[in-house]
Image (tube, rainbow, N blue to C red):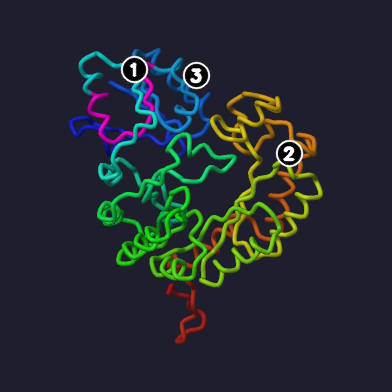
Amino acid sequence: MAAAIPQWVNVTFVDENVQEIPYTGAWDFVGISVMLTSQLPSAYAIAGRFMAMGVEVLFGGISSMLHAEDAKKHCNSLFLGEAEGRMDAVFNDKKNGRLKPVYDYFMNFPPMESVGPARRSILDYSNYHYKNVKMVDLFHASRGCRFNCFPCCTPYLGGRVFRPRPMEKVAEELAAIDNDRLFIVDNSLAQNKSWEMELFKTMIPFKKKWCCHPIEDDDEVLDLAVQAGAWYVYQAIFDTSDYIKKRVQRYKNFGLGVEGTIILGTDDHDEDCIRRLIDFLMEIDLDLAEFTILTPFAHTPIRAQFEKENRILTDDFSRYNAGNVVFQPKKISPEKLQELFHYAWETFYRDEPQAYKMYKLYKKIVPVQQKTVSPANSGDVQNA
């Protein structure tokens, strides 16, 4: 979004995850990008504080779009849609005192040729180091998703048409990233095999190491992915089938790490099923596992189903963080599902904590200072 703002605008970026919000200061305009549903109450409070100071507030982002009717009550202006080619109008309206209540570009997608490099100059990278290791940069090569998975709101937000960026734009973005490690945030790279292979060929010269969502289950594609620097992959694990076991093993055969993403609380899950799933995870050599409770986010297929079946227990946004049971499960009680969620995390990371497993993944790609004994003097220790 910042990359689409006119150059005559002076931008100060604040990441509330790692920085304090500077309420003091002569701010002309505040934009709040709200990504997660659970962040909405906090975003409303922040907006209210600035508006009480006489500062106009613009809302945007995923959750602002998912909850547009509610969000527009808490800001001066609401932006719906993708930012490219639209920010000049917003800021000119602000400059001229004609800010609109809503800028509605929903499902009116800009041409992918207009998506340029992110404006990384606004980031204070000192906030994104852990023990002197620079964290990954985010990068995307496409938008939209041709799939319509039951818990996902991407088709509502970005459409069900796969929209790849031109390869020259991909190369331009990669050349602008001063970081050897990336997270490719595309919903799935496995949407078009020929495009996927072209993407990896384009990435090879940049010598980046990266993680991503699923890659095509194809030897030629996986080989190219490794050449392009694939590091580890997020893989949805939805059952205990041989298909899942083989899928994980194929990634492993190509030297890729695997982080399993596991949703608990689907309609086929009873207590025994969930416990067997967790046992299965312990057997298939995952590097990491991320457990979430099925959450009926707005504008998802599962939300529509649960509303029809009157199974929504609360609309308290703060509880919609994929760690709380907010619906009535089909085969177990909400309390038991909550208990099994905690059991899953505790069991999987019982022998090795999550941070240590992540360290082992990082160790594959980050040069680590190792202590060695000097041959000349076994009492001396030096850094190699």
User: Mark 3 Cα within 10 Å, few/some/many (few <14, many 20+)?
Assistant: few
* Disc 2 secondary structure class: helix
The reply to whether the C-beta atoms of the residues labelled 3 and 2 are less than 8 Å apart is no
Residue that mark 2 sits on = 338
- Binning the other alpha carbons within 10 Å of mark 1 as few (below 14), some (14 to 19) or many (20 upward) gives many
Q: Amino acid at mark 2?
A: Gln
User: How many numbered callouts?
Assistant: 3
Residue at image location 24% in from the left, 25% down from the top: 89
Tell me the CA gap for discs 1 and 3.
Answer: 18 Å
Magenta stretch?
76-91
In the picture provided, is 279 more to the left or to the right than 118?
Answer: right
Front one among 363 and 317: 317
Query: What SS does tag 3 mark?
Result: helix
Q: Which mark is in front, 3 or 2? A: 3
Residue occupied by mark 1: 56
Residue 252 sits above or below residue 105 on the image: below
Q: Which mark is residue 70?
A: 3
